[in-house]
Amino acid sequence: MASTRTKTAIGVAMVALGVLQAVAYALQAQVVPAVLGGVYATLGVAYLWAEVLRVEDATA
């Protein structure tokens, strides 16, 4: 099992990469890759909520 620190790092990396992709493609006026970057960032937030925050709430 991955530790909470590892799961947090994965989630933060997903959000950062998604935002980076969304911004980079938005500056080039490429809509589809920009939207997909936003979706990836949203999935990262969902992963953080499901795997990190809910687990911490359940153990508290």
Image: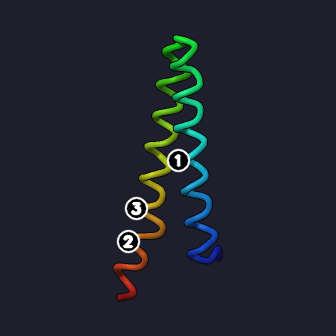
Q: Amino acid at mark 3?
A: Trp
Q: Amino acid at mark 1?
A: Val
- Residue 15: mark: 1
User: Which residue corresponds to mark 2?
Assistant: 54
Residue 11 x %, y %: 55, 57
Helix, strand or loop at label 3? It is helix
Q: Is residue 3 above or below residue 30?
A: below
Helix, strand or loop at label 1? It is helix
Answer with left or right where residue 10 lies relative to residue 49.
right
Q: What is the total number of numbered labels drawn onto the structure image?
A: 3
Measured Cα–Cα span from mark 1 to mark 3: 12 Å
Residue 41 x %, y %: 49, 42
Residue 33 x %, y %: 56, 21
Viewer-side residue, 34 vs 43: 34
Quadrant location of the C terminus in the rendered image: bottom left
Kindly report which numbered mark, 1 or 3, lies closer to the viewer in this rendering.
1
User: Which residue corresponds to mark 3?
Assistant: 49
Q: Are marks 2 and 3 in contact (CB under 8 Å)?
A: yes
